[in-house]
Image: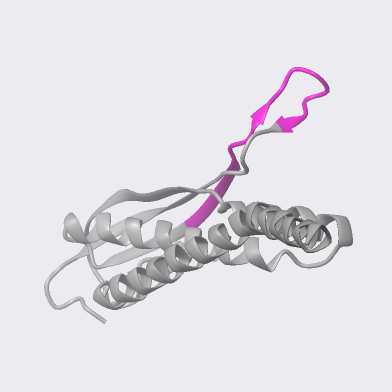
């Protein structure tokens, strides 16, 4: 019976080690996926509601539109990866290759900042946004020794452009 008890304790120890080492990673993976899916659904819904606002990176007002007023609009968002994406990106940097988990994060940031800019333009009555640009900034803290970056990887995505109010009958 002593040998059987030892095997049971070894299995319990192994189970305990697995639950507390792999468990948090799986938990963060599931939570991160749920949050990401929810955000994608929100993006799709809001993009559909704002599709009537014309956005272009060109510097000219769209043909057929007579601008009655113009003003700067911006959309800003700060994003950070979840624990699992940070862990997986660390593994991938050792191996090499495309960091797909962070690519989706940046895509969501671009779409969110663009939507925030369009929402601001709509609130002020604009139907067109021209000369749209994106800027990014890395928000990691830099330490004094050798300018090494520390802390969680966070990125700010800023989208800006010139909103145009068109005169009546000037819609494309």
Identify the residue at horizontal 43%, vertical 63% (top origin): 35
Horizontally, is 27 left or right of 102 in the view?
A: left
Question: In this picture, which residue range is highlighted in magenta?
Answer: 133-149
Q: Is residue 142 magenta?
A: yes
Pick the residue in front: 94 or 65.
94
Horizontally, is 144 left or right of 25 in the view?
A: right
x then y, percent, for residue 13: 72, 54
Identify the residue at horizontal 73%, vertical 55% (top origin): 9
- Is residue 55 visible in the rendered image? The answer is no
Q: Look at the image and tell me in which quarter the N terminus lies.
A: bottom right
x then y, percent, for residue 100: 68, 68
Pick the residue in front: 140 or 38.
38
Identify the residue at horizontal 69%, vertical 32% (top origin): 150
For this orientation, the residue located farthest to the front is 1
Pick the residue in front: 58 or 8.
8
x then y, percent, for residue 16: 66, 54
Q: Look at the image and tell me in which quarter the C terminus lies.
A: bottom left
């Amino acid at each position: 019976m002593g040998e059987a008890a030892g095997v049971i304790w070894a299995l319990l120890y192994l189970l305990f080690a697995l639950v507390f080492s792999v468990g948090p990673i799986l938990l963060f993976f599931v939570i991160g996926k749920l949050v990401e899916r929810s955000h994608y659904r929100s993006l799709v819904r809001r993009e559909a509601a704002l599709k009537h606002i014309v956005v272009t990176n060109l510097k000219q007002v769209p043909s057929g539109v007579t601008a009655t007023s113009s003003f700067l609009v911006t959309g800003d968002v700060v994003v950070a990866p979840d624990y699992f994406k940070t862990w997986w990106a660390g593994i991938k940097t050792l191996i090499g290759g495309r960091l797909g988990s962070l690519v989706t994060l940046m895509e969501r940031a671009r779409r969110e900042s663009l939507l925030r800019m369009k929402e601001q333009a709509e609130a002020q009555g604009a139907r067109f946004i021209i000369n749209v640009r994106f800027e990014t900034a890395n928000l990691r803290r830099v330490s004094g020794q050798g300018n090494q970056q520390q802390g969680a990887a966070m990125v700010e995505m800023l989208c800006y452009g010139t909103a145009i109010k068109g005169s009546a009958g000037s819609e494309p």
